[in-house]
Amino acid sequence: EIVHDRGVDTAWLYVPMTVQIVGDNSGNGYFPFENAIRAVCEMNENYADAHIRFYLVPGDAVRYLNNSAWYKHQYSGGSQLINQNKLPNRLNAFVVDDPAGNCGYAWQDAIVLGKKCSGADNTTWSHEAGHHLSLPHPFLGWEGFQWDYSQAAPDEINGFPVEKTDGSNCYFSGDGFCDTRPDYLNNRWFCNNNKESNILQRDPNGIEFRSDASLFMGYANDECASRFTQEQMEAMRENLYTEHSAYIAGDPPFSEIDDNASVALISPVDSQNVQYNNVTLQWNLVPGATFYVVEVSPQASFSPKVYHQVFTGPVTSTTITKGLLNNWNMYWRVRVYNEWDICQPYDNIQVGVFRTKNLTATNELERV
């Protein structure tokens, strides 16, 4: 049980992060940095009730590593990845293709995330950060254990007392929290309309129950999970005050971008004709922005994207020489973030339109 003398603690705690994105030996397969920004933004939404906010380390927000043995690895490769690249006084998040066959894991004071489990509205990042900040699974002890759930659970599993529904042993069984229900489900599972497991389980006294699917630390599918409990939040905050106090020792950047800010596009706009294999996009700077994300698509929905690039620093243009289709209308936009302000709304984002042509061939024909 967490005991401290801070009383009701609602102060915001700010956690710095560096995202280390792993590719193969040739630098292929990187997880898009903008998707990592989105994942951290979604973590902040999930941790808001705990008054914990994550931000990227100014000047060291992202690093890229090229190593096929880390890109797809077993735990020995994961250990090497972490210990050779872990940076001090921050949460290190490594994004790989295959983290030892898992969606992710928290180990050796870092978290490792799989690309395939890092899409929009995925809870893997929040789950692994919860482990990093001391939280166990609610089914602690059942990991890797096979059981016939139609039978009453044993009193002990893998050396851990099995939690009962009456709460009589909740502080020294399961995850050690009394505001999380018993849970014995150690594989991914779907929830019902009540955000509970379809699987009925029986505690050591034979009492039937269903697992709570709303907990980020369980194994319910992503669309089911939505919260940390009060005791879980208190435990994570205590971890930041003690084991990870170095995280909250420094001052965060507190650099906000105006929510109404929109990147002003200079050219090409208004369906201007441009050379399809030599297009220069130009835009204006936005005060406070550190990252400029440039996207080009043949669709106004920006799906699919034929060009996507993240620029760091005061960059106002880029030239595209390949990848654009000839004789197409193309849509382009620039989105901005900084290390602190990574959840920008884009209700008023400006979209430019241009038409690709083979102007070089046309000029040659006119001269003839």
Image (spheres, rainbow, N blue to C red):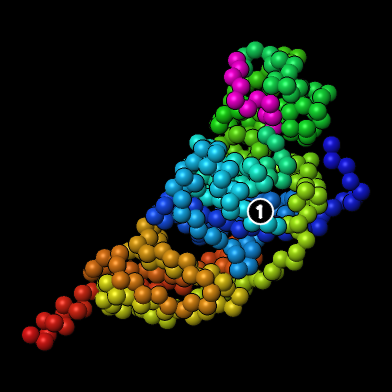
Q: Is residue 348 at all visible to an observer of this figure?
A: no
Quarter the N terminus occupies = top right
What percent of the width, then of the height, locates residue 38? 55, 57
Name the spot of residue 174 as percent of width and height, x first: 73, 28
Secondary structure under the numbered disc 1 in the rendered image:
strand
Q: Is residue 72 left or right of residue 104?
A: left
**The one of 164 and 67 positioned closer to us in this rendering:** 67
Q: How many marks?
A: 1
Q: Amino acid at mark 1?
A: Leu
The residue that label 1 is drawn on is: 91
Q: Residue at x 66, y 38 (%)?
A: 217
Q: Give the percent coordinates (x, y) of residue 9.
A: 84, 53
Q: Residue at x 60, y 68 (%)?
A: 59
- Horizontal arrangement in the rendering, residue 287 relative to residue 98 (left or right): right
Bin the neighbour count of mark 1 within 10 Å (Cα to Cα): few under 14, some 14-19, many 20 and up.
many
Q: Above or below — where is 85 with respect to 270?
A: above
Image quadrant containing the C terminus = bottom left
- Residue 155: x, y in percent? 75, 16
Looking at the image, is 91 positioned above or below residue 205? Answer: below
**Magenta segment range?**
138-148
- Dominant SS in magenta: loop
Tell whether 105 sits left or right of 250: left
Q: Quadrant of residue 295?
A: bottom left
Horizontal arrangement in the rendering, residue 264 relative to residue 130 (left or right)? left
Query: Is residue 126 positioned above or below 287 on the image?
Result: above
Say if residue 76 shows up in the picture: yes
